[in-house]
């Protein structure tokens, strides 16, 4: 791989020399240490403020700069003009590639923290030299960062889209359906099953749309479009508290912004049906 094609080059082993200006993604829990403006602080700024890492991981290089994650103590407090922010709050202040590395970093920090001991025999685990894993020296079980595939789908019936409301959404917001892929299931099968479970609608022609890493906490969102086949909407009032068909010209409130694949799917539907998506 070369920087001509990839801004970020992942690797698990730190170089001997981290270079003049490495990037440090320091987390307290799932919150990133940032400047007041929400940008990534320099190494000097982090050191001067007195932050110390419990554990570190090498992540790879972004535009040639070496990147590290750092796990801070749970008691770490804002200091030296630096504060903590969850990653949701940083889509505007970090560029896309940096935000993606931060999303990678938080998952590796969490994996490292929660895999210090073997789940089968409770022995301390050791870092693998070969790849991004830890292993139990006793039973040899390798432990990799978890990644949970989830599907998200725009179900369409002619010029209408199926939107639903989860009880966790802010008041009045509707969105496309989503759910986790189960073991042994293809993403397309997960689309059909989730849509049926949540609305009792059957769909056909499931087509891949796009995907997005979604580090909340460790999903890979696989986006699809699907066509209505049959059925009437029936909701369970638990996972879904409302579901309806909407025309592009008569949409309800949906999540504002352009950062998530749910918005990309809805905006794509609007454009194909002659409505300019909100900016
Ligand atoms: Zn073990």
Image: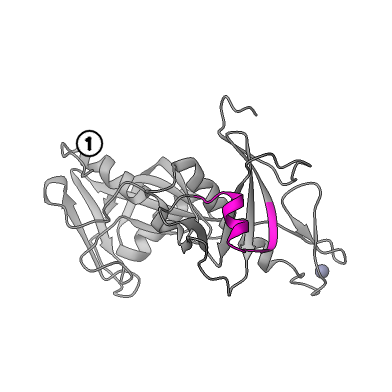
- Can you tell me whether the CB of the residue at mark 1 lies under 8 Å from the nearest atom of ligand 1? no
Task: Answer above or below: position of 76 versus 105.
Answer: below
Residue 268 image position (x, y, % from top left): 28, 40
Residue under label 1, please give it.
272
Task: Answer above or below: position of 279 versus 123.
Answer: above
- Verify whether residue 56 appears in magenta: yes
- Verify whether residue 7 appears in magenta: no
**Residue at position x 42%, y 57% in the image:** 36
Viewer-closest of 100 and 38: 38
Residue 43 image position (x, y, % from top left): 61, 50
Looking at the rendered image, the quarter that the C terminus falls into is top left
Give the secondary structure at mark 1: helix
Outermost left residue: 249
Q: Quadrant of ligand 1?
A: bottom right
Left or right: where 133 falls relative to 49 = right
Residue 207 image position (x, y, % from top left): 39, 40
Viewer-closest of 248 and 156: 248
**Residue at position x 57%, y 51% in the image:** 104
Q: State how the image is colored.
A: one colour
The range drawn in magenta is 40-57
């Amino acid at each position: 791989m070369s920087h001509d094609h990839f801004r970020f080059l992942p690797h698990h082993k730190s170089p001997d020399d981290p270079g003049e200006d490495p990037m440090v993604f320091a987390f307290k829990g799932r919150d990133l240490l940032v400047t007041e403006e929400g940008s990534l602080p320099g190494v000097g700024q982090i050191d001067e403020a007195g932050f110390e890492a419990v554990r570190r991981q090498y992540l790879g290089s972004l535009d040639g700069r070496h990147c590290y994650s750092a796990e801070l103590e749970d008691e770490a407090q804002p200091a030296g003009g630096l504060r903590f922010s969850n990653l949701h709050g940083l889509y505007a202040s970090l560029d896309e590639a940096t935000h993606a590395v931060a999303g990678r970093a938080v998952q590796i920090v969490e994996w490292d923290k929660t895999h210090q001991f073997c789940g089968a025999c409770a022995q301390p685990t050791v870092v693998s030299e070969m790849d991004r894993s830890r292993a139990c020296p006793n039973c040899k079980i390798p432990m990799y960062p978890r990644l949970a595939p989830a599907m998200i789908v725009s179900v369409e019936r002619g010029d209408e889209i199926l939107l639903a409301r989860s009880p966790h959404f802010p008041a009045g917001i509707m969105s496309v359906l989503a759910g986790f892929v189960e073991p042994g299931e293809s993403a397309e099968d997960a689309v059909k099953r989730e849509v049926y479970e949540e609305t009792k609608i059957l769909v056909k022609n499931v087509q891949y749309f796009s995907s997005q890493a979604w580090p909340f906490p460790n999903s890979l969102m696989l986006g699809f479009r699907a066509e209505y086949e049959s059925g009437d909407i029936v909701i369970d009032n638990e996972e879904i508290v409302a579901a309806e068909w909407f025309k592009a010209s008569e949409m309800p409130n949906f999540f504002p912004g352009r950062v998530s694949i749910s918005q990309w799917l809805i905006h794509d539907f609007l454009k194909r049906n002659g409505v300019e998506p909100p900016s």
